[in-house]
Amino acid sequence: MIRIDARWALTEAGWRPHVRLHVGEDGRIVSIDDAPADPVPADPRAELRGIVRRDAAPPADASADLVVPGLPDAHCHAFQHGIAGVAERAGGHGDSFWTWRERMYASLSTLDAAGLERTATALYRRLRAAGYTSVAEFHYLHRLGGEPGRRASLATALESAQALVRAAASAGISLLLLPVLYRWGGFGRAELGPRQARFALARDDYRRLIEALLVQAADPALRGMLRIGLAPHSLRACDPEDLRWLLELREALMPDCPVHIHVSEQPAEVRDARAALGQTPIAWLCEHAAVDHRWTLVHATHATPSELREVRTRGATVCVCTTTEANLGDGFFPIEDWFAAGGRLSVGSDSNVGTDAAEELRWLEYQARLRRQARAVLVDADCPHPGTALWRRAVAGGRLSLGSDRPGLAPGAPAELLLLTNEGGLAPDDALDDFVFSRRATRLAGTVTPAGLLLQQA
Ligand SMILES: [Zn+2]
């Protein structure tokens, strides 16, 4: 049992002062009660440092100025962290998403299972230290190492999946593993390129991979920290027949599981979908699949207004990956319209060129400000603070993307929390704005996941 006292906690019902929160052995919040009067020491950092110094064993109690739900990272390709920061140069004909993709493919020739586990462990620790407490890994790297051109097998797919499961366990971050069905090199059943062959699994091997992972995820010792979902890579890598097969598999094995798909990230993809399917990708998807609140559409950058109306009506979540989309020059998702319409929103670190939870939210708001030439755009009628408004939306949408129906901090919800300092004694909404936009007086002091409490070194 972990006990946390806080001056303010951002619960599902809003900010609540002076709370005492208990986390059970099952990794869920047991209770949120009124705390004894002013239980938090004057300098919570000193107390937190003291806990670290007194006892090398994981601490069981902590105090914080603010407790807020950790942000779910709803879209991640851990291995791409390996080229973050070193793919920033123009070639002879400029640089684009497509030239970046060639560099990303080339980096795979030397990556083995141990290398993937090292990269993913370092990344997941970094994500947790920057405010993410869970991650959805969109995993299509089903064969590691070796020469290009060879397809994956069940054995190679299990090897790479296990590297990611071990990495998440080591970092103490909750993992939604989304094994990806990747079958074709482009629309119209285009042949896979030699560098894409390692992403392709035969359908039967894919089914056996999912069955094996489901057995593993059911182990109570994992405290619900491993979940499995399904991911058709995109409409260019899965044709209509593949998608139908995948959704039948879902119905048979886990009908409520999350489904994630890349969609409408690039104008060329939208153009090719029109040519091959006679419709834009999202319009086609909504007509041919039962898209609902269990679905996460990743990017949707070039969605049309009518497509977004349909997605919102269905209750699906759009995962926007602002730093990656900016880094790759994808374009602007119409975040102001989506936010104002109450569309479900999650964020993702995607290529992991940016790994900071608050940064994703900050740049959502900043792109809206730059377009509108106005400030504090992404706010709610009952909350004029973009930091809090965005945080609450991204937690609720992110939890749904990761398969949980609990939109925030409440008894029974997963214990995925951030402990923040508030050295300026700010009102809680101001403090969360400060954490998202500046961090002058507000800082991440610790995180809680079902794996336990981890205090940051001050
Ligand atoms: Zn992606």
Image (cartoon, rainbow, N blue to C red):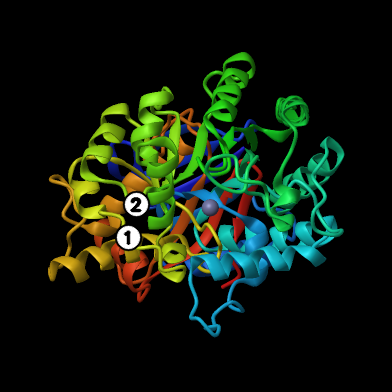
The quarter holding residue 243 reads: top right
Left or right of residue 367, residue 201 in this image: right
Q: Is 256 placed above or below 70 here? A: above
Quadrant of the rendered structure where residue 42 is? bottom left
439 relative position to 153: left or right: left
Whether residue 421 can be seen here = no
**What is the number of the mark on residue 391?**
2
Callout 1: SS: helix
Residue 282, percent across and down?
36, 38
Q: Quadrant of the C terminus?
A: bottom right
Q: Amino acid at mark 1?
A: Leu
Please state which of the two labelled residues, at mark 1 or mark 2, is closer to the viewer.
Answer: 2
Q: Dot 2, how many residues are within 10 Å of its Cα: few (below 14), some (14-19), or many (20+)?
A: many
Label 1, on which residue? 432
Q: Tag 2 or tag 1, which sits nearer the N-term?
A: 2
Disc 1 within 8 angstroms of ligand 1 (CB): no
Front-most of residues 357 and 59: 357
